[in-house]
Image (cartoon, helix red, strand yellow):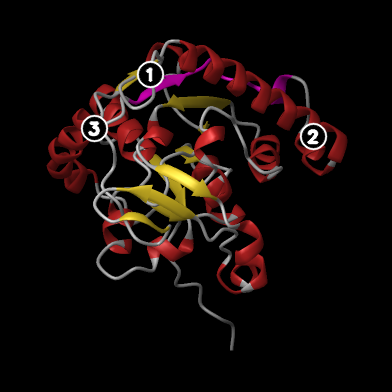
Amino acid sequence: MPDDDTSEPAGSERDPDFLRVARPFLDLYAAYFRSEVRGFDRLPETGPMLVVGNHSGGQLPPDIPVLLSAWWRERGEDDPIYVLMHSFFLALPGIGPVMARAGGVEANPASAEAILRDGGVLIDYPGGDHEVFRPWSERNRIDFGGRTGVVKLALRTGVPVVPAVSVGAHETVVVLARGTALARRLGLDKRFRISVLPLVAGPPFGIVPGGIPTLPLPAKITVELLDPIDWSERYSTDDADDPDVVHACYDELTSVMQEALDRLAGERRYPIIG
């Protein structure tokens, strides 16, 4: 007997009516960080597009809600925008379903490609837990950890890449150590796809393991959407399997984003105060 495919399409749980109700609360959260999102005038009018950001803020990264609240305000809740998320968060009772209604989808190549081929807007933070827990001294550094999946996705689908560079989000928490070696020794990378076991400092508990939430410091967060990068003008979809092309695109993307991050960081006089 043939198997019936009863799985729902990627992102099918996204609920614009839920977002219209939730957005005012998210706007209040973003206001705590005096958030500013620039560059909407640079975006294509419609998808598909792949928005690539630097991930910051430790265990409660504010970069995602800051960007999404501004996006819904500027382009409306019906704009089909989704966020790739770790399966760990989507599996959490009471949290995963809310994330799914807000457009969260599991970070895997099949789901990502399906959303883009359907004309959607997809936000990806390729640095993941490696970047979101980079030490305080590296807060103004783009660090995807050599993860090239986002480049291969863009090349395979031929969609434009929109870099979304944020500054300040990694001043909402003080990461003392990433804990990569410890996570590897405990086998977390193989069992749970978790590559770090960090140590962070923040109120109200002081120095704690990264799994314990801390209250975010009120750093000003600025996000800038840069000009789209369209690799389809230079490369074919087959080039997604060419390591030289992939690494050249990766270097281009991270260099453009680092240049923007250096500029945005230069606008800030003091950490946290901004």
Which amino acid type is shown beneath numbered disc 3? Ala
Task: Report the quarter where the N terminus lies.
Answer: bottom right
Residue sitting at 59 percent across and 70 percent down?
188
Marks 3 and 1 sit apart, C-alpha to C-alpha, by: 20 Å
Query: For numbered disc 1, what is the local secondary structure?
Result: loop
Q: CA distance from mark 3 to mark 2?
A: 35 Å
**Closer-to-camera residue (220/84):** 220
- Marker disc for residue 270: 1
Q: Position of residue 101 (x, y in %)?
A: 28, 53
Cα gap from disc 2 to disc 1, whole angstroms:
35 Å
Crowdedness near tag 3: few (<14), some (14–19) or many (≥20) residues, C-alpha within 10 Å: many
**Residue 174 showing in the rendered view:** yes
**Residue 239: x %, y % from top left:** 81, 36
Quadrant into which the C terminus falls: top left
Disc number for residue 30: 3
Placement of 12 over or under 127, stated as above or below:
below
Q: Is residue 214 magenta?
A: no
Q: Residue at x 72, y 19 (%)?
A: 233
**Front one among 250 and 242:** 250
User: Image quarter for residue 36?
Assistant: top left
Q: Nearer the viewer, mark 3 or mark 2?
A: 3
Q: Secondary structure at mark 3?
A: helix
Residue visible at 53% across and 20% down in the picture? 261
The amino acid pointed to by label 2 is His
Q: Secondary structure at mark 2?
A: helix
* Dot 1 alpha-carbon crowd within 10 angstroms: few under 14, some 14 to 19, many 20 or more: few
Task: Please give the range of residues in magenta.
Answer: 221-233
Tell me residue 181's x, y (percent). 66, 61
Whether label 3 touches label 2, CB < 8 Å = no
Mark 2 Cα-neighbour bin, 10 Å: few <14, some 14–19, many ≥20:
some
* Callout count: 3
